[in-house]
Amino acid sequence: MGEILEREKPVIQVRKLRKEYIMGQEKVVALRDINLTVYKGEICCIFGTSGSGKSTLLNQLAGLEKPTTGQVRIGGVPVSHLDENQLAAFRQQHVGFVFQSYNLLPELTALENVAMPLMFRGMPKDVREKEAMKMLARVGLKDRIHHFPGQMSGGQQQRAGIARAFITRPDIVFADEPTGNLDTKTTKEVMEMIRRFARTFHQTIVLVSHDPEMTEYADRIVTLRDGEIISDIKTENNN
Amino acid sequence: MSFSDILKMCTDNLKRRKGRTILTVLGVFIGCTSIIVMVSIGVGMKESQDQMLSEMGDLSIIEVSQMYGDDSAAKLDDDAVESFRQMAGVAAVMPKVNFNEYAVSLKAGINDRYYCDWSNVVGLDTDAMEAMGFEIMEGKVPGVSTDEAVGGQYLAYNFYDSLMPDGHNMVNRWDIYDENGNEKELPDPFFDILKTPLTLEINTGENGESVFRKTIKITGVTKEDYGKGWETSEGIMMSIDAMKALLKDIKGTPQKNLTYSTILVKAEDISLVTSIEEEISGLGYYTYSMESMRESMEKSARQVQLMLGGLGAISLFVAAIGITNTMVMSISERTREIGIMKALGCYVKDIRLMFLMEAGAIGLLGGIAGVLFSLLISVGINLVAMGALSMGITGQAILDALLGGEGITRISVVSPGLIVFAIVFSIFVGVASGYYPANKAVKISALEAIKRE
């Protein structure tokens, strides 16, 4: 019963979000007045082809970019109107990222990479590395903690990326084509891992992909085309 | 982020690009070295000037004389002496009468065997000698007797021996080095001046026919000090009363209101000299002091210092551009990294601090290396100047070259203050050069993390 109520609590609220770019002389409309609500604990897949505006939408949701008009609220906070400092603090507390190209810093070990979000919070080295060690064990990289990204496979790097995204216990994790560079088998591993974490801690996942297979792991699929939502379907994957 | 984390990221980044870091540090190192060496040469110039001046005389003495060519100008009489004495910061006042109305030659020994063709005779306030800082090397200050006087340090060396042929008829007091260039004991003069009465031969007539003779006893010898007058070297100093008596004997009339040729005023401290000098010249007198000379010399030395330092500063400026360049390059290489850090919630101020510290560290490293190397150069220059290369480089010689000491003339002087300044300035140059790149880094968008190549 509580589960159901939680699921009805909106986490992300998007109102009349519009994003325009100026490309040379031309004005390109990437998002046309999007309205969207994502609920707590949902794994929401934003699906679309290249150029559909799905990446732009993710950038807006995560506060990486300012909208032309409209508003994004996360847990009631208008992220589209925060300044740099407030955004940094907000990301530290509420947001995690999983990137397509993993984005681990090449000069840092897996352990240091995973501990990085905690370092930004000012947590002492021994405390945060203990925490990172636990996360790495959870994603099955216990014997890789002192490896550099260059010494790990794509799948291992993405697992380290997931450990880094979840180490702060964020409310929302944004995943940008998280399996775009991985083979089918690893894709399955990585996605199950994300889903397991999300379910354990009632976290919301916003996933951007053009891969129809992703729909398997999502609770909800929002399809974009030419900057507009053309469909918004709840799936039956309620496990 | 904690400070130690930021520091670690800085050092990691500097280490990661070792070659580039070293080259950039090299730029700062050269700039810093040239500033220190240049300034140290300027300071060395000043040091040797000061040394020269203090050897020449007492810096706290002001010589007051009457304005030249103006009879109505303020007179140097007893009232003037008294008014100077009342001034704040004045330690002692000594009036002085030159005896340059007449030519004086000296005779000494049996049958006037020893003679001196010319001598500088002055009358001065012998009671004030001690307070003025006249150093009596031997003997004592003359008493009330008008037949007593003190002589200058080298007075006895001015005498010729009339019984000896040319070339052997005087003791050369400049002959103080042996054939190896080492200092040797000064030879004794022909006679002991304290035990031999001197006869003043004063030429009172037009053509040298009329000669007045007076015999005096030298009771003491003063140490040479040009700040107190040339007579401390080779002249004869008698009391004002003795001088008055002498003039009376020559002229036949008593000398009442004597006008002094000069009045020496000694300040309690060198720092007071300028203000006392201003006060006196305000009364309409002409003043002169070693201090005012020192000040003008110091001023020109400072100008040279600024010029030399400026030359060094140019190379440090070039180094600063090097730092900026390195940082801009490093930041454009790390654009994505910075984007990732921002996306993961790194504060803008931490990113800025990280890059400023990186630039500051380059400055610090260059500064430290520059200080060490310029100390080496400075010691090298000084060793050469001291002639230690031919005499052998001992530990003591190196220490002298570094720290200086009594009678050691250093060309290059690196003071602790200069070292601290150089390091602080290098850090400052680093941080200042990092300012623009750091702001560039701060402006990098978190979106860079998402971009796909």
Image (cartoon, coloured by chain):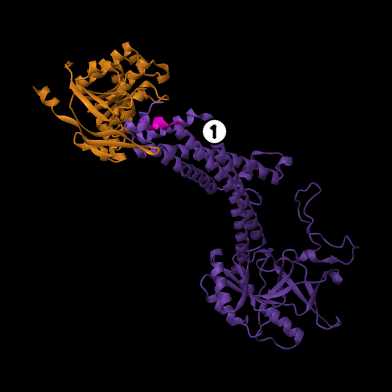
Chain colours: A orange, B purple
Position above or below: A210 against B240 = above
Task: Name the dominant secondary structure of the magenta segment.
Answer: helix
Q: Nearer the viewer, residue B378 or B394?
A: B378
Residue A170 visible to an observer of this rendering: no
Q: Nearer the viewer, residue B148 or B91?
A: B91
Residue stretch rendered in magenta on the structure: B333-339
Question: Three-letter amino acid code at disc 1?
Answer: Ile
Q: Chain of mark 1?
A: B
Q: Residue at x 79, y 74 (%)?
A: B199
Q: How far across and down, in percent of the image, does residue A190 sit? A: 29, 16
Q: How far across and down, in percent of the image, does residue A46 sit? A: 25, 24
Q: In this rendering, would A19 be left or right of B249? A: left
Q: Residue at x 60, y 63 (%)?
A: B295
How many numbered badges does the structure rendering display?
Answer: 1
Q: Nearer the viewer, residue B419 or B168?
A: B419
Task: State the image quarter where residue B75 is shown.
Answer: bottom right
Residue A200 visible to an observer of this rendering: yes
